[in-house]
Amino acid sequence: MRMRATAIAHPNLALVKYWGKRDIRLNLPAAGSLSVTLSGLRTQTSVAFIPGQARDAVILNGRAVWGPKLDRIVRFLDHLRRLAGTDLRATVNTENDFPTAAGLASSSSGFAALAAAGAAALGLELTAPELSVLARLGSGSAARSIHGGFVEMLPGVMPDGSDSHAVPVAYENHWDLRCLILLTAKGEKSIGSTEAMNHTASSSPYYRAWVESVPHDLALAREAIRNRDMKTLAVVAERSCLRMHASAAAADPGILFWNGTTIELIHHIRKLRSDGFPVFFTIDAGPHVKVFCSASEMSAVTQSIRSVFSGDIIVARPGPGVYLKDEPERR
Amino acid sequence: MRMRATAIAHPNLALVKYWGKRDIRLNLPAAGSLSVTLSGLRTQTSVAFIPGQARDAVILNGRAVWGPKLDRIVRFLDHLRRLAGTDLRATVNTENDFPTAAGLASSSSGFAALAAAGAAALGLELTAPELSVLARLGSGSAARSIHGGFVEMLPGVMPDGSDSHAVPVAYENHWDLRCLILLTAKGEKSIGSTEAMNHTASSSPYYRAWVESVPHDLALAREAIRNRDMKTLAVVAERSCLRMHASAAAADPGILFWNGTTIELIHHIRKLRSDGFPVFFTIDAGPHVKVFCSASEMSAVTQSIRSVFSGDIIVARPGPGVYLKDEPERR
C-alpha cells in the first residue's frame, strides 16, 4: 500500500437536474439526473494517510479548511477508513482552478477526486460503480464526475445505496459541444446546494411534482444525446433547469439563486434560440449561467453574449472522468 | 333609462394570487384570491348605448381599439345586453391614468368600471355580488375592484359562476398601508395574464399543487389583515407571489415575467425585511415590483429603494370600490 495518491477530476453540470434526496445521510437522490463532465475546469487532490497523525487536515487552495466544511470531509474519510479497515488520519491537499462553492460544481469534482485518490492511497480496488457510490457519499453530484462525457445518475432502489451510482451515456468525444460558463457574480453562494435542496424537499409544495417530472426528462435527454439532437436537448435541459429553480422558489421561504444578470442572460439565450441559434442555458444552485452550443457555433454565440455581458467567461467542453495522476485517463 | 353613464374604478393587486381558471369561458377561478384595491391609479369609463349605431366602438386613452382587444369588450357588452334585453350598440370611452396592459392590473379596473357604467346606462339594478359576477365575465380580477380596501374573491362552486364573486374583507381605512409601484420596464408585457395562466394550467406540473396551496394562504392573509399583522401578511404575500411565478416558470415552455431589475429589487426588499423593516413585495404577470409598507415607514423604504432603483415610482394606498361619477362612493 503506497498510502498516498493524487487524482484529477472535472466538475459536471447537470442537464437534467439533481434536486432532492431520498436519504440525506447516504446522499441517495430522489430521482435520477443527467450531466456532462467538463474539461476546462479541474480539481487536483492529493491524499496521504500518515501514521501518527492525530487528526485529518485539509488544505483547499492553499488554505486550511475548518468547521462544517472540514467535518464533511472527515466524514468522507471515515467512509474510506471503514472500507480499508484502517484508522490512519489523512492530509488532503486539493486545488481548484476555478471558483469554489460558487455554483460551479466544485463539490462534484472535489469529492470525485478525493474518492479516487483516497481509494488508491488505501489500496482499495474498486469497480467504477463502487467508486461512484463512494464519491456519492461525499456529494451526490460527485458520483457523476467519476465518468467522462455524458453521464446518468441512477437513483437506485436499495436502502443501502449500493445501486445508486452513475453510468456513462456517451463518451466525451461523442458530441463536440461547448459550454460557456458566464460568471455573473463573485464570491461564494449564499446557500449551499445540500441545504437548499433539503429546504425545498421539506417546504416546497412543488417538490413532489418535481421529482415525478424527472424520469420523463431523463428519457428524452438520453435519447437526444445519443442522436446529437440539440433541439430536443435544449428544450429538456431548460425545462429541467427552470423546474428545479421553480421548486426552490416555491419553498418557504423561497430560495432565489438568480441575480439580475442571470435573468437578463436567460432572456438573451431564449431570444438567440428563437432567432434560430442551436443554443441553450442551464443554471445550478447559484447565479451563474452556463450556455451550451455546438463547437461550430461558439464564436457567433460568444459574440452575441458579449453584446449584453461583460463578465468573465470560462469555456469548457465534454471532458474525461476522474483519473489518477501519472496514470492513463480512465476510459 | 338614461342610456349613458360614467364609472370610476381602481385596479387591485392580489396579495394571495389569482392564477388559473376552472372555467375559461366564464372566467371562473380555480381558487380564491385576496387583493387590495388601490387609489393612486384610476380608470374612468363612459358607456353610451346609442340607437342606430351599427357596432360597438371602444376608445382607450383616446385611440380606437381593434382586433382581439375589441372582441373581448364586445363579448362583455353582449353579456350586458343579454341582461338588459336590448340589442343597442355602445360607444365606450375609457381612460387610465397609468400604463395599460403592462402588469399594473388595468384589466381589473377597466372591466370593473365598464361593468358599473354599462349596468347603470342600461338601468340594471344589480346587487354588489351581481355586479362582481358581471365584472368577472370581463376579467377575473375585475370582480375584486368592485369593492374597496381589502377584498377576497370567492371561487364558488356553481357551474354557472353565480357564487363566484368578490366580498369585502376590510374597508380601505382599516389599515393605512402604502404601495410603491416600481416600474421596471416600459411598454406592454410580452404575454397577457389570461394566456399565461391558461398555459400554466395546461403544461406546468406544479399547477395542481399551486391551486391546492391557495386556501391555506387565504386563511392566513385574511386573519393577518384583520389583525393588521404585517409580519404574517409579508410572509404569505411573498410566498403566494413566488409560488405563482414558479408555477408559470415550470410550464412548458416556462414563462418568465421578471427582468434583471425585478429580481434585484426582490433581493433588496428581502434584505430590507431581514434588516427589520416591515415591508414586502408582490409581482403580477409582468416585470414591475409592488412594495407594501406602513404609511409611517414609507419615507425610509422609498429612500432605501432609491439607492438601487432610479425608475418611476407610483405611490398608491388602499382605495374605494367602483363608483358612478357624480354619485357618492360605494361603501
Image: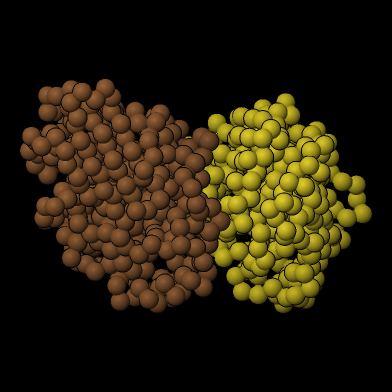
Chain colours: A yellow, B brown
Image coords of residue A188 (percent x, y): 64, 66
Image coords of residue A22 (percent x, y): 50, 47
Q: Nearer the viewer, residue B7 or B315?
A: B7
Residue A148 seen in render: no
Residue B134 is drawn in which quadrant? top left
Q: Is residue A184 above or below residue B76?
A: below
Viewport quadrant of the C terminus of chain A: top right
Residue A318 is drawn in which quadrant? top right
Tell me which residue sits at (60%, 29%) in the image: A219
Tell me which residue sits at (65%, 75%) in the image: A66
Image coords of residue B102 (percent x, y): 43, 47
Q: Nearer the viewer, residue B54 or B73?
A: B54
> Does residue A326 appear left or right of residue A7 in this picture?
right
Tell me which residue sits at (25%, 61%) in the image: B318
Q: Is residue B258 above or below residue A154?
A: below
> Does residue A241 appear left or right of residue B1 in this picture?
right
Image coords of residue B257 (percent x, y): 48, 47
Tell me which residue sits at (8%, 34%) in the image: B1
Residue A178 is drawn in which quadrant? top right
Viewport quadrant of the N terminus of chain A: bottom right
Q: Nearer the viewer, residue A195 or B123?
A: B123
Q: Is residue A60 above or below residue B219?
A: below
Residue B75 seen in render: yes
